[in-house]
Amino acid sequence: MDIFPEFPKKPENSHLSIPENLSFDDLIEEYSSAFRKIGNEYVEIFSKSNFLAGSTALKTITYPLSNQKFNSTFIDESHNLCLSTALLVLSRSERAVLTGDPWQIPPIYTTGISLKERSNFGIFNVFYEMAEKEMKEILWLRYNYRSNPKIVEFSSNFIYGGRIIPRPQGNYKLEIRNVTYDWMNPEKEMVFVHRDGVKENRSNEDEAKTVAWIVKELIKAEVNPGDIAVLTPYKNQVEKIKDELINRGLRKDEVEVKTVHGYLGAEKDVIVFSIVDTSYFGFIDRRMINVAVTRAKKKFITVGNYNKILEHEGEPIYLLLDFIIRNGLVVVD
């Protein structure tokens, strides 16, 4: 049976026609009646035909999909979908395929759920752990086509247990003119820039100024501003960095500045990551570091307090710094 059936042909003169010179109440009634008619037509189509519907999870529990049963459901990026919302869809499905990544950032909750517990409430992680316990086969997409092999190496070794293999497409080295600083060198894909800043109110002024300087120097070296993104754990630091970029002469939003949580699924040639924290690094967990690093296609530059991080051996941020010390470039001047 064809899964893309022809929808019933639209009758002639079926366009929405609203009489003129109606009172406000009558106008509301006319529009309400017209939208009810459209909704009824949707229901009739769904009840008589096989169909393929693209929707967010929440939309499937609203009219006109709310009463529909599905033969198959595909949920993409399911690591970022909470368990309760996903079950509202899956409970109406005969079979389901979930794609996701257990080491991406899970759903965000405003309740008192701890950072380490959040992944327990994501639908992908729940099914992933069930499959592992029952020794069921899990299909891994092993090849990374996005990033420079050195960038992939960090995440593959420290996050995925060596499962990910780099297969970059095209030129994976940053094209840059006038390399005026060592950290610009395209052969140094992973860079750490030290700043002896202090975290105040979830922001770090010294880091913000340094990030803005780095971005400005890259643009002066003819890196396209659209190929650069700045990431940080905190919204307050986002705003501070935006202000510093404007102070450096950049137009508002000329370069994207986002929290790591707000940049899931995106990518840029160059990612500049402002750590902000200088004492407690627990908020920057393995998932956040993994997302930040793997957004970079050609160069990843971290700005943080080198000495403070070295005091936290074993923390995820320490592992990142240690990798850069051994495989990249550290700038401490």
Image (cartoon, rainbow, N blue to C red):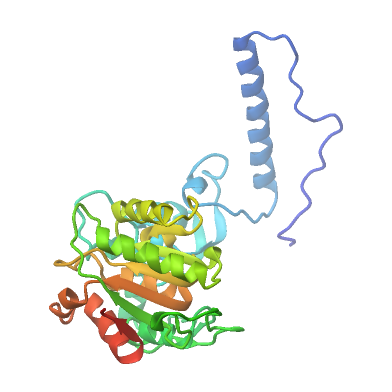
Compared to residue 70, the image places residue 160 above or below, namely below
Q: Residue furthest right?
A: 12
Compared to residue 78, the image places residue 111 above or below, namely above
Question: In this figure, what is the number of numbered marks?
Answer: 0
Asked whether residue 126 appears in the rendered view, the answer is: no
Residue 298, percent across and down?
49, 79
Residue 160, percent across and down?
36, 83
Q: On the rendered structure, is 4 left or right of 100?
A: right
Residue plotted at (49% across, 67% down): 228
Compared to residue 283, the image places residue 156 above or below, namely below
Q: Residue 263 appears in which quarter of the rendering?
A: bottom left
Asked whether residue 58 appears in the rendered view, the answer is: yes
Residue plotted at (64% across, 11% down): 26
| Most foreground residue, 248 or 256 | 248
| Most foreground residue, 233 or 288 | 233
Residue plotted at (21% across, 56% down): 113
- Quadrant where the N terminus sits is bottom right
Q: On the rendered structure, is 196 left or right of 229?
A: left
Residue 182, percent across and down?
40, 84
Compared to residue 227, the image places residue 69 above or below, namely above
| Most foreground residue, 165 or 147 | 147
Residue 207, percent across and down?
28, 64
| Most foreground residue, 270 or 146 | 270
- Quadrant where the C terminus sits is bottom left
